[in-house]
Image (cartoon, rainbow, N blue to C red):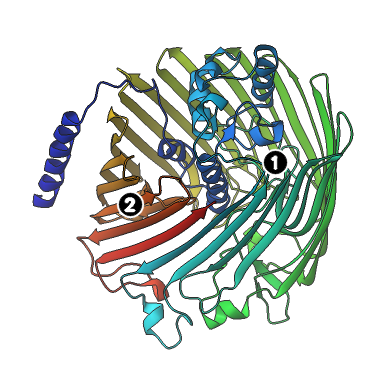
């Protein structure tokens, strides 16, 4: 209780200090921050494909730190933003064509079909020419971006102390380098070593060309690619229930993140042989990690990327994967139609085992999938869908969506999906409860509304069904997912938001109703200070968890310093009612964690940037203290202490 009282005292003192620092400068009404955006997209904590979400957020974080000029951004550039529909992108380009270049981003509110919430989100990733950032340099020279990061844990895990544990030191290290010359050329290199690994065993590079004659984009090296609604190939655009997919996948993109699994390695090209036709071809060959049976067959394809122990090292790149495919797409007069397909061969036979939930997994060496995507857009109406077929078990899948914009304040969407349990594509990434477009059918209704200026509401209802028994289930299962979120801006400095999330989903043959309530109050006393207080409550099957957290951001332009700190107190009955937290992160990174039990967590990041914005030094310190246990984790990850302290450092050079 004394710790909690001290924590509350800090909030009161900090708030008083912020009032003293308050200036008379007005802030943008409804200003949205990066962390608020991340909170929205990471709100569904039970997603099975969190790695894909992290990868997408890393791409968006890089775009946030290197925003687009709204006056020169192409359709493919704006398609990187998951909250923009194709019709909204068309409206932005039409406004610039008829009215000339935007002088400020406030002109976005004059674009038809752009609601206030979308305009606020666009301010994170774009700028107008009149607001050109100092970091934007002349396109007539080569630009270099180099960064290196080192994470130092101030503790030992059980894997470091046991002779049969981790083979390497506990340090994490990565190096990233990108080179760009104008809009047409870019190249990149990445190297990474995870904690516990002995060598830098993750690496990648790419060279990309764009808008050179009939070549829309070409990439040699590591790349990501997605078409249509993502049923066949879908790892270039993220879709979530809070912002259901409003556009097709964004096509070919170079691999700029640090992910070790979700990418292709080879070459790809997108051509434009005609005004309305796009033709894409790609080929890839790379090694994958897998667990093998006694007969040398693949039981499970792994995606963790860890090679810390002798067992993990033996599973490293022990199966080859060769993929080739393509897409052809036509757009015109509001219609679009395209066909996508790929063929894949593994160097070993896939044999996932005899467990009931694995009976629908693909088996063999050769696989393929093909699909037809289609759509029509006419001002307020948007229709789209994709139907696909897989050769693995002759399965069918289809997803169809419709969106109607009543006005710039009200948008109603519906998404229908049917993924047969016989269908399987290794690279699908469509809207799904299970994280994979297989063994699921359902319908999602989504509403975005702004009944009053400064007040935005988001709501959805999702009903889903799994015909084949999932993991830990002995029969088919159903579920429902409901969410209501409201955000209200008061006096241009205060923002209140509340979110209630109810998910009823069967697990271990028991229906688990998860109730989550999150409230947040943000206050900006001046343009250099931002305060945010968050309270969260999670209840499931009689288990309750709660958290109270305070976050403070401070910017000092003259010395070029930025501070971002977070302090939180949590208490849960058990792991079932755990609390998820988005924490302050370093440049081009996203950090989240879940806590259960009784304790406190704290994170502090500090960043210094030179006046010419060419140099950047960052440091982050994160700490967790448990009051109800003397150790953390399990197995080789066990920490024999109630405290966990991590130090991260990063250096960036941008010239």
Residue 640 in percent (x, y) is at 28, 74
Specify whether 105 is left or right of 583.
right
Q: Secondary structure at mark 1?
A: loop
Q: Which mark is residue 223?
A: none
Residue receiving disc 2: 606
- Quarter of the rendering containing residue 484: top left
At a point 26% along the width and 43% down the height, the residue shown is 549
Nearer-the-camera pick, 415 or 252: 252
Q: Is residue 91 above or below residue 54?
A: above
Residue 415 in percent (x, y) is at 64, 29
Residue reaching furthest bottom? Answer: 163
At a point 72% along the width and 37% down the height, the residue shown is 229
- Circle nearer the N terminus (2, 1): 1
Residue 576 in percent (x, y) is at 37, 52
Residue receiving disc 1: 183
At a point 31% along the width and 58% down the height, the residue shown is 622
Nearer-the-camera pick, 304 or 566: 566
- Quarter of the rendering containing residue 210: top right
Residue 78 in percent (x, y) is at 64, 32
- Quarter of the rendering containing residue 500: top left
Residue reaching furthest right? Answer: 273
Q: Is residue 347 above or below residue 253?
A: below
Specify whether 208 is left or right of 4.
right
Label tally: 2
Nearer to us of marks 2 and 1 is: 1
Question: Could you tell me if residue 390 is visible in this image?
Answer: no
């Amino acid at each position: 209780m004394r710790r909690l009282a001290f924590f509350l005292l800090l909030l009161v003192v900090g708030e008083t200090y912020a009032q003293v620092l308050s200036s008379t400068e007005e802030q943008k009404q409804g200003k949205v921050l990066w962390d608020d955006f991340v909170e929205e997209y990471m709100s569904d904590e039970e997603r099975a494909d969190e790695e894909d979400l992290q990868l997408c957020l890393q791409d968006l974080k890089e775009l946030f730190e290197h925003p687009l000029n709204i006056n020169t951004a192409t359709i493919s550039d704006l398609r990187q933003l998951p909250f923009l529909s194709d019709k909204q992108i068309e409206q932005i380009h039409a406004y610039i064509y008829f009215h000339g270049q935007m002088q400020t981003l406030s002109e976005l509110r004059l674009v038809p079909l752009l609601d206030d919430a979308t305009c606020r989100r666009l301010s994170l990733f774009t700028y107008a020419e009149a607001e050109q950032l100092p970091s934007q340099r002349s396109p007539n020279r080569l630009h270099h971006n180099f960064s290196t990061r080192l994470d130092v844990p101030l503790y030992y895990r059980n894997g470091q102390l046991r002779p049969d544990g981790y083979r390497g030191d506990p340090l994490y290290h990565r190096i990233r380098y990108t080179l760009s010359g104008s809009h047409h050329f870019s190249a990149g290199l990445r190297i990474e070593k995870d904690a516990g690994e002995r060598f830098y065993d993750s690496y990648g590079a790419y060279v990309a060309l764009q808008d050179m004659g009939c070549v829309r984009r070409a990439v040699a090296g590591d790349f990501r690619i997605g078409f249509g609604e993502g049923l066949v190939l879908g790892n270039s655009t993220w879709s979530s229930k809070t912002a259901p997919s409003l556009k097709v996948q964004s096509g070919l993109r170079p691999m700029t993140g640090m992910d070790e699994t979700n990418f292709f390695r080879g070459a790809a090209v997108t051509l434009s042989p005609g005004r309305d036709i796009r033709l894409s071809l790609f080929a890839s060959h790379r090694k994958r990690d897998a667990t093998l049976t006694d007969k040398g067959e693949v039981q499970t394809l792994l995606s963790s990327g860890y090679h810390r122990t002798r067992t993990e090292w033996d599973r490293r790149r022990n199966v080859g994967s060769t993929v080739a495919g393509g897409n052809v797409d036509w757009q015109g007069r509001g219609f679009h139609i395209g066909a996508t397909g790929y063929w894949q061969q593994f160097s070993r036979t896939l044999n996932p085992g005899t467990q009931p939930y694995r009976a629908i997994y693909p088996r063999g060496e050769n696989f393929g999938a093909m699909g037809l995507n289609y759509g029509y857009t006419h001002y307020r109406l948007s229709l789209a869908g994709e139907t696909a077929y897989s050769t693995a078990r002759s399965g069918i899948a289809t997803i169809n969506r419709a969106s109607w914009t009543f006005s710039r304040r009200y948008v109603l969407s519906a998404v229908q999906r049917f993924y047969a349990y016989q269908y399987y594509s290794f690279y699908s990434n469509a809207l799904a409860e299970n994280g994979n477009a297989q063994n699921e059918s359902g319908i999602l209704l989504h509403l975005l509304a702004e009944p009053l200026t400064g007040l935005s509401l988001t709501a959805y209802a999702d009903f889903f069904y799994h015909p084949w028994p999932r993991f830990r289930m002995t029969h088919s299962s159903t579920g429902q997912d409901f969410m209501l979120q409201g955000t209200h801006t008061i006096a241009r400095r205060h923002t209140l938001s509340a979110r209630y999330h109810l998910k009823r989903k069967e697990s271990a043959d028991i229906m688990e109703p998860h109730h989550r309530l999150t409230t947040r109050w943000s206050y900006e006393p001046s343009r250099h200070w931002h305060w945010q207080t968050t309270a969260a409550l999670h209840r499931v099957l009689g288990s309750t968890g709660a958290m109270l957290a305070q976050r403070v951001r401070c910017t000092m332009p003259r010395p070029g310093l930025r501070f971002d700190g977070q302090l939180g107190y949590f208490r849960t009955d058990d792991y079932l009612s755990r609390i998820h937290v988005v924490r302050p992160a370093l440049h081009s990174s996203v950090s989240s964690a879940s806590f259960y039990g009784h304790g406190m967590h704290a994170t502090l990041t500090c960043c210094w940037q030179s006046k010419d914005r060419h140099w950047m030094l960052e440091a982050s310190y994160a700490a967790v203290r448990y009051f109800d246990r003397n150790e953390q984790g399990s197995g080789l990850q066990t920490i024999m202490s109630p405290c966990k302290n991590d130090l991260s450092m990063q250096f960036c050079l941008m010239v």
